[in-house]
Image (spheres, rainbow, N blue to C red):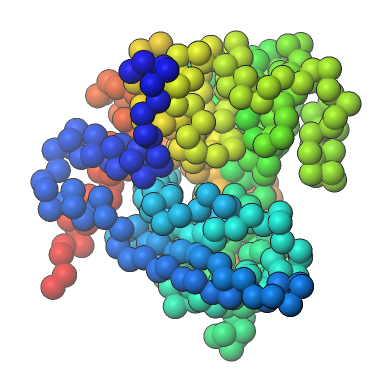
Amino acid sequence: MADHDPVPESAIECALAQFHDAAERLNLDSGMREILANTKRELSVSFPVKMDDGSLKVFHGYRVHHNETRGPVKGGIRYSPAVDIDDVRALAMWMTWKCAVAKLPFGGAKGGVTVDPKALSEGELERLTRRFGSEIGMFIGPERDIPAPDVGTNAKIMAWLMDTYSMNQGYSVPASFTGKPISIGGSAGRREATGRGVFFTTQEAYRHMGLSLEDATVAVQGFGNVGSVTAKLFAAAGAKVVAVSDSGAAIYDPNGIDDIQYVIKHKQEEGRLPPEHAGDHLPKDDLLTLPVDILIPAALESQITSANANDVQAKMIVEGANGPVTCSADPILEEKGIPVIPDIVANTGGVIVSYFEWVQDMQAFFWREEEINDRLERIIKEAFQEVAAVRERDGGTYRDAAYTLAVGRVVEATEDRGIFP
Ligand code: GLU
């Protein structure tokens, strides 16, 4: 594929292509393919919100259940201007595979509202959240569908959603949403879980390849909940975090950014990376092509595409975000010998600790953070080892192996349950 000729490579096209490749490898019959290539149910809502200036504005939102064969469905709710039904379908499908790779007793779902949350006041955000929560209430419930935070949402939004659901039920239902504040049944370690999982996965991949993280150079794209925690853990483990970026800027120091804690604090307090690092700034897309040992795209989907994959110089890519490497970039990276540890393994930390949160809420019995982190480490490292074993057996990429494993598990569950009636 010529790098001056980018092909369409949207999340849904890639999600379907990745699934069909796995279906081919697993030799699935056409009926099973059709079940798994489709979403089980979809809810599309339009709803008005009273804006601060007294006007009414109509917003559009979605909740999609991809597959519930292995259990109730799980997946985040995203607030972004880029949210559309196809995006949500792709993200829901990826959740099914993630839960299967990590052997969580869940199927996959996703939701979202087409909105820029930064453009709303706190009051508008709360009214939008509560109305959206009410609109999708018929899909939600601890034994049915348990949403969580995603891009543009956070613990506070989960609290409003859990409260709205509980008010509509008439009693408190803490297990209806995960990623909540600790005060209402949130789990210790949930906020850091995705970043911590990215770190554990990379640590395990490095161990598997016989490499040491000491002094390994790392570039992290995205400095939100996932990227900032990942960067902090790499720095603490003796790796050199040389570049970080957010949606506005990138900071690069080839000797390693020595004050990651300060950068995190600045980002949390001011909402952007510290401008006094201006001397080290580089165009933010250049972060993806720096000569580093480990590149962690932890922002949004479709960042490494057929247009820039040829320029990637990293020795390994670990997908912190969902779908940051497109399906047309994958073969280019494979050709270049750059392993990609896929999202459905590397970023499962979030949903793994969401699972712990749900279990704790259902039992009304809470665990210490060390317990959470130990169990997360065990589950995510085992998932990587199982994927690596399939890759050694079958060849191909880590993504191929992860899909073979995940799709295979959902197929097995479908066959064991049988088709109703
Ligand atoms: N939104 C996160 C993800 O994409 C977490 C989902 C969850 O915890 O249910 O994996």
| Left or right placement of residue 230 versus residue 412 in this view | right
Residue placed most toward the observer, 43 or 101: 43
Residue 196 screen position, x and y as percent = 62, 38
Of residues 397 and 209, the one nearer the viewer is 397
Where on the picture, by quarter, is residue 256?
top right
Q: Position of residue 337 (x, y in %)?
A: 40, 12
Q: Position of residue 416 (x, y in %)?
A: 19, 58
Given residues 172 and 211, the one toward you in this image is 172
Count of numbered marks: 0
Camera-side residue: 375 or 78? 78
Residue at image location 68% in from the left, 22% down from the top = 283
Can residue 181 be spotted in the picture? no
Image quadrant in which the N terminus is located:
top left
Write the residue at 55% across / 35% down.
320
State left or right for residue 10 relative to residue 197: left
Quadrant, the C terminus: bottom left
Q: Residue at x 51, y 31 (%)?
A: 303
The image shows residue 18, relative to residue 33, as above or below, that is above
Seen at 18% across and 48% down, the residue is 33
- In the rendered image, the residue lying farthest to the bottom is 170
Query: Where 398 sits versus 383, above or below?
Result: above
Q: Is residue 122 visible?
A: yes
Apparent side of residue 108 relative to residue 265 in the rendered image (left or right): left
Across and down, in percent, residue 362 comes to: 54, 70
The quadrant holding residue 5 is top left
Please, which residue is most extreme toward the right here? 276
